[in-house]
Image (cartoon, helix red, strand yellow):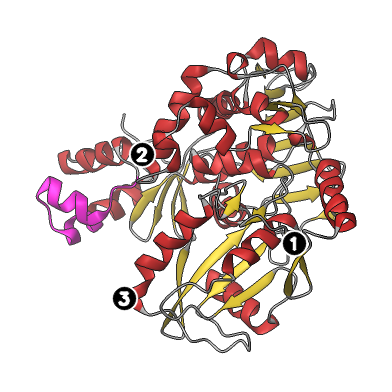
Amino acid sequence: MTSTHILFKAIKDGEGISTEFKTCRNQLNRDVYETVCAFLNRHGGTILLGVKNSGDIQGVDADAITQIKKDFVTAVNNPQKINPPTYLSVDEMEIKGKTLLYIYVPASSQVHRCQGRIFDRNEDGDFDITDNTNLVAALYHRKQTLYSENKIFPYAGLNELEPDLIVRCRKIASLRWENHPWSNMDDMELIKSAQLYQTDPVSGKTGVTLAGLLLLGKRNVLLSAVPHHRTDLILRKVDLDRYDDRDFVDVNLVESYDRIMAFVHKHLPDPFYLDNNVSISIRDAIFREVASNILIHREYMNAFPAKLIIQNGRVITENSNKPHGFGLIDPINFTPFPKNPVIAGFFRQIGRADELGSGMRKMMKYGKAFGGKDPELIEGDVFKIVISCPEFVQNIVGEKTTTKTTTKTTTKQQNSILQMIKEKPNTTAKEMAVFLNITEEGISYHLKKLIKAGIHELE
């Protein structure tokens, strides 16, 4: 299902507990932040700017889009407006020739306030529950029960975290987004902003949370807090009773992600794939989502070890889970539920994960081209993903595949094209043409020759 179809369906279904329309013709509605707060406190949801309450598509004025996006992002990062602050993106989408602004608000593991007031969601409305002590208490209890990532370790501070890793994450976020709030924060301000350092509203104890230790913690501190923490990476193709290669990963999640991707790069092929005349790595697109899923959506209070097993013709992952259903997931009708919103939010800031649901759509899009079958996602107490993978390297253009041949003959220009693809996988045909002083038609001709010959890499 395309993004346009999803948008049409959301508008057709109307406002509800997880959908809100705002007119916002040339400026933000004042109550949009109350909706953000309510979605954060409830189950998350989608805000569509440029749609009337009736569902009529009005669109947002083109001249106002840039300022609206800037005002929104600034406000949700301002603790005077939303506290704790949050990081949300605003995407432009075209429908019926009009521009809408799409905002996905994930459920949070925190209780948020909008200008000092607590809002919750019920049906299609946002309700101020600040003065209802029973509802506020129930909200705090629900968050603490659902999200173990918020467990506070009162004696843990910056000394228990990897300082170089904090610097690295700040740099990555700043490079990805201009004027990212982390850019001008010191280490303590950053981990507080990312909700990795909190105060328990009941006991008053303050410290680094489980999410903070998992994401950035030093290995010995992390394992003292969660001794069963590990991700087992296994290659099992020849020795089916044991393994051919193995990596036992028990470090923080940022470093774990890098180790998982390195293992995938070592043992899985990366077929040559053209998507709209642009070469992309479908292996990385698929397993980027797989790696982040293993780490983000795990129930860390459960001692069941996470696994990624590469076998003949398929890759299987398993991780402990708090299920919100059982059985095979239908990706079209699937409603994502954030298991660890703080960890997920941090991963999005450093480019290790996409917005909730979009990464899975990419995995489904490229999965069949990669291994010949759609990926399977199976929900239960143990969450499983099954990805089919090729036992030989294929060259893929859209839906067409050709098996790699053993004889390779290339011209100097074709080798130059292959070199560019290897060094910069996202190079476009136009960029190749300019760099190599060849027409775009010439680039297309050589690419077709390379694909026909089954050549996907340099000698």
Which one is in front in this view, the residue at disc 2 or the one at disc 3? 3
In the image, is residue 67 above or below residue 450? below
Residue type pointed to by label 3: Asp
Percent x, y of residue 255:
56, 23
Percent x, y of residue 66:
35, 66
In the image, is residue 407 above or below residue 213? below
Which one is in front in this view, the residue at disc 3 or the one at disc 1? 3
Percent x, y of residue 395:
43, 47
Which residue in the structure is indicated by mark 3?
63
Distance between the alpha carbons at the discs numbered 3 and 1: 39 Å
Which residue in the structure is indicated by mark 1?
330
Quarter of the picture containing the C terminus is: top left
In the image, what residue occupies the spot 75% across and 29% down?
306
**Observer-nearest of 265 and 11:** 11
Please tell me how crowded label 1 is: few (under 14), some (14-19), or many (20+) other residues with Cα within 10 Å.
few
Residue type pointed to by label 2: Leu
Residue 175 tag number: 2
| Residue range corresponding to the magenta coloring | 426-445
Quadrant of res 207: top right
